[in-house]
Image (cartoon, rainbow, N blue to C red):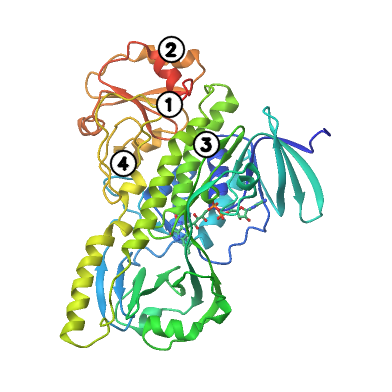
Amino acid sequence: MTSPDLRVPVLIIGGGPVGLGLACELGWRGVECLLIEQSDGAITHPRANAENARTMEACRRWGVTDAVRAAATPSDFPHTVIYATSMRGKEIARIERPTHGGSQPTSTSPERPQRCNQLWFDPILAARAAQFPSVKLQYHWRLDGFVDTGAEVIADVTDLGSGRPLKIAARYMVACCGGRSPVRKALGVPLEGEKSLGFPINIFFRTPELWRYHDMGKIAMTFLIGPEGLWGNLTALDGREQWRLTLQGTSEYRDPATVDVKAEIARAIGCEVPFELISCLSWVRRDMVAKRFVYGNVLLAGDCVHQHSPAGGFGLNTGFGDVLDIGWKLEAALKGWAGPHLLQSYDDERRPVAIRNVGEATANFRRQSVGDTRAVLDETDEGARLRADLGERLIAETKRQFLSEGIALGYIYAPSPIVCPDGSPKPASAAHIYKPTTFPGSRAPHAWLEPGRSTLDVFGRGFVLMRLGAAPPDARAFETAAARCGVPFEVVDVTQPEIAELYERQLVLVRPDGHVAWRGNDMPGDTRAVIDRVRGCEAA
Ligand SMILES: Cc1cc2nc3c(=O)[nH]c(=O)nc-3n(C[C@H](O)[C@H](O)[C@H](O)COP(=O)(O)OP(=O)(O)OC[C@H]3O[C@@H](n4cnc5c(N)ncnc54)[C@H](O)[C@@H]3O)c2cc1C
C-alpha cells in the first residue's frame, strides 16, 4: 500500500453537531484529531432547537455556555408550550417550563436547558473546536471509503475543492456522518426500527415580532389542532423574527413545492401576516437504532446510529451523550491505560440509552394523536367540552415530552462491563423525573462545592475518588492501584454534610465522563480489581 498522505490518531467523519462536539471533547482532552466534513459547514435550515441540561454541561466543560445562551432565544422569552386551534384561535392546553432558559442554575444541574437552534449552535461548536491546538477541521473533504486493517483505519478521502484524492491513516475513526452515513452502510450495520413514521414539511420563515398579531403572548412551541387532528407545530427559533412551521406530514413523500406556504402560515396564525420565506423542505420522521456502535477501530455516533422523531428533542442530545462516553475512552486507548474492552463498552453503554430515547421519542409522537377533534373549532358547548377534555388529557399525557429531565440526566449505565454494581436495586426511571443518585453507572449528582464551582467541574481529566463526610476511609490504596496501571486519578475530599448525604456513600469513584464507576462506605478488598474493571479489562 502507498504510504498515507496524513496520519492522525483520531479521524472524525462529519461536521454536524455530534462530530463538532466530539472535536471539542477531544480538543479539551488534548487528543489530536482531524474532522472532515464534505460541505462548507453552513447551516441553512433549522433542525435541533433544544439543548438539554446534560448537553449544556458538556458546553460548560468546553467553555461555550455564554456563547450558547447569547445565541439562544433571549432569557426573557418563555419556553412555554401550548396547544391551540391557531395563534388567534382557542387555546387548548398550556405547559410552562420554568426550569428552562436563562442562566440561573437549577437544583439538579449548574446549567439550564436552552433553545439555541443548530443555525447558531453548530457554528459556536465549530469555532470552539478550531481553537483547540490538537483539533483540525477540514471542510469540503469527503470520505469515499475505508479499510480497517486491525492496526489502523485507512480512509480514502477527496478534497472536493481541488479534486485531489488523499489517503488518511487513523488509529481510530469515529463516524458522525448522520442518518445517511456511508460508514454505517459500508460496514453493513443493520438499523432496527421503523424507517418512516411520516414525511413532515418544514416552512422556515421570517416575521419580526410575530406575537404582535395575536394575544397568546410569546410562545416557544405551539401545537396546532384542527378538525382533522394535530396538523402542525409553530416553533420560535431566535425569539425575534425566525420561525419554523412544521406540517405534521403525510405517510408518503410530498413535494414541498406543492405546499401553499402563505395559506399554511395564515392558518397557523389565524390571519394573514407579512412573511419572508427562507426555505421549505420535507424530511423523514424515523425510529431506528443501529445493531452495533463499535466495529474494530471504527466507532459510530449520533444520527449515524440512532434516528429519533424530534418529539422531545432528543436526537442531538443523545449524540452529545455519545460524545461524552467516547471522548475519555479514546484518550485512554491512545495513552495506553485502557483495558482491551474499554472501547467496546461504548456500545454496551450507549446503545441501551439510544434504544430508550428513540422509543420515548416515538411514544411522544404517538401520544400527540388527539383522537376525534371534528368539533374542536365549534362555538358550542360540545366544542368547549371537547377542548377542555382534550386540554386535560394533553397536559397529563404529553408533559413528559417537554419536561424530560429523566431522559437528560437520569440515564444509568447498568449493566455495564466497566461499572461495579454494589448490589443495591437500580432506581426506577421515568422520562420526566430525575432523582439524583450515585447508583453505579449514573451521572454523579451536581452540588455546589463553593459558589460557581459544581461537583461536575472537578470531573473530566481522569478518575476522581470523592471522599465524603467527616471521617471517610483512607483511600491511598486506590491511588496506588491506579498509578500502577497509569490511570489518571485524583482524590477530592468533600466535607459538606449535604453533599455527603446527596452522594449516599463515603467513597464514590467518578469516571472522566462524570458517571459513577464504583461506590462504597469501605475500601474494596481488591482495589486493583476495581481499577481494572473500570478501565475496561473485563468483557461484557
Ligand atoms: C425538524 C427537526 C427538529 C429537530 N429538533 C431537535 C431538537 O430540538 N433537539 C435534538 O436534540 N435533536 C433534534 N433533532 C435531531 C438533530 O437535528 C439530529 O439528531 C442531529 O443533527 C444529528 O447530528 P449528527 O452530527 O449526528 O448528524 P448530522 O447533523 O446529520 O451531520 C452529519 C454530517 O456528516 C456529513 N457527512 C456525511 N457523509 C459524509 C462524508 N462521506 N464525508 C464527510 N462528511 C460527511 C454531512 O454533510 C453532515 O454535515 C431534530 C431533527 C429535525 C429533522
Q: Looking at the image, tell me whether mark 4 or mark 3 is earlier in sequence order.
A: 3
Q: Amino acid at mark 3?
A: Gly
Label 4 – label 1 distance at C-alpha: 33 Å
Asked if disc 2 and disc 3 are in contact, CB closer than 8 Å, the reply is no
Count every numbered label the image shows and give the total: 4
Image spot of residue 44 (x, y percent): 58, 66
Label 3 – label 1 distance at C-alpha: 15 Å
Note whether 469 is above or below 436 in the view shown.
Answer: above
Q: Which residue is mark 3?
A: 327
Crowdedness near tag 3: few (<14), some (14–19) or many (≥20) residues, C-alpha within 10 Å: many
Q: Amino acid at mark 4?
A: Pro
Please state, as top left, top right, bottom left or bottom right, where the N terminus lies in the image. top right
Q: Residue at the location (63% across, 42% down)?
A: 187
Q: Which residue is mark 1?
A: 418
Front: mark 4 or 3: 3
Q: Which residue is mark 2?
A: 480
Label 2 – label 3 distance at C-alpha: 25 Å
Asked if disc 4 and disc 3 are in contact, CB closer than 8 Å, the reply is no
Q: Looking at the image, tell me whether mark 1 or mark 2 is earlier in sequence order.
A: 1
Which quarter of the figure has residue 101?
bottom left
Q: Which residue is mark 4?
A: 451
Front: mark 4 or 1: 1
Q: Residue at the location (21% across, 88% down)?
A: 379
Image spot of residue 255 (x, y percent): 57, 75
Q: Residue at the location (34% across, 66% down)?
A: 76
